[in-house]
Amino acid sequence: MSGPRIRLAIAAEQEVISAGLAGVLGAHADQVEIVSYTPNGTRDAPDVVLYDVIALHEGEATDLDHLVKETDAAVLAIARDLRPDLAAQAVARGADGCISMAAPGEQILALVRAAAAGELAGDVTLDEPGIDQPFERLGMDAGLTTRETEVLGLITQGLTNVEIAERLYLSINSVKTYVRSAYRRIGVTTRSQAVAWCIQHGFAPPAAS
C-alpha cells in the first residue's frame, strides 16, 4: 500500500483488549501505525481511535466526549456483542462508526481505512450497501436505520427533540422526521410507547436520577 500509514490509537480499559486489537492490526504494519494517545497530547495525534464501549457501562464517558468533540480523530466504537445498547450509546454520542470486537481483522482494517479517509464522517455507514453488518445492531430486526436507532436511544434516555438535535448536530426538523419514520417502523404512535418498545428490545433504560 502506498502513502502514509494510518495512525491508530486504542482506547480500552482492559489491557487484554488493547493488546489483542494491537496484535490484530499490528499485522498490517505497512498500513497502520499503532500510537499511544493521551487526551491533552498532540504528539503522534491519531487519525483513528478504536474505543471500547465497555467504558460506557458505568462511567460518564467523558473520554469519548473529548475524542468526539475536541480532537480531529475519527472514532470507531468497538462493540460488545452481548451489550448492543452500549454500541448504540457510543453512536448517539458521536462515534463515527462501530464494529464488533469479534469481527475479522480484515474487516476492522477496512473500517479503519474508511474512517481515516473520512468516509464515515457525519453518520455511521454500516447500513450502506456493500458494508457487512459486523453484529446484530439494535433495531435491525425492525428495519431501523442507524440514525433512527440513535434517535430512539436518546428518546429512551429521556432527551427532548431539541436536546437530540443538539446532541446529534441535526436540525429539529430532521429529528422530527427520524422520530416519525422510527415510530412507523416499530408500530407506535407516542413517546411512552416508543420507550416501552425500546426497553423491551434491548435499548439501555433511562439512567437512574
Image (cartoon, rainbow, N blue to C red):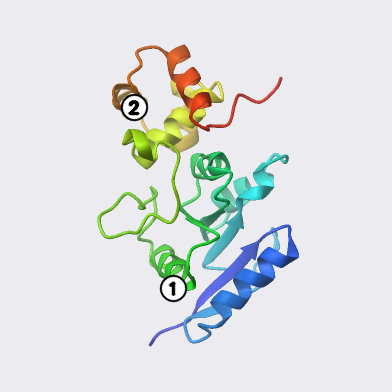
Q: Which residue sits at x=53%, y=45%? A: 87
Q: Earlier in the sequence, mark 2 or mark 1?
A: 1
Look at the numbered discs 2 and 1 and tell me whether their residues touch, using CB distance below 8 Å: no
Picture coordinates of residue 5 (x, y %)? 48, 81
Residues at marks 2 and 1, CA–CA distance in whole angstroms: 33 Å
**Circle 1 residue:** 106
Residue type indicated by callout 1: Glu
Q: Is residue 167 above or below residue 7?
A: above
- Give the x, y percent position of residue 69: 55, 48
Q: Is residue 204 left or right of residue 190?
A: right
Label 1: how many Cα within 10 Å (few below 14, some 14–19, many 20+): few
76 relative to 201, above or below: below
Which quadrant would the N terminus be assigned to in this image? Answer: bottom left
Counting other residues with Cα less than 10 Å from the Cα at mark 2, is it few (<14), some (14-19), or many (20 or more)? many
Query: Mark 2 belongs to which amino acid?
Result: Ala
**Label placed on residue 182:** 2
Element at label 2: helix
Q: Position of residue 128 (x, y in %)?
A: 28, 52
Instruction: Count up the numbered dots.
Output: 2
Residue at point 71%, 19% (across, down): 209
Q: Is residue 143 visible?
A: yes
- Residue 47 located left or right of residue 172: right
> Could you tell me which residue is drawn at 40 percent across and 36 percent down?
139
Q: In terms of secondary structure, where does tag 1 sit? A: helix
**Residue 22 lies in what quarter of the image?**
bottom right
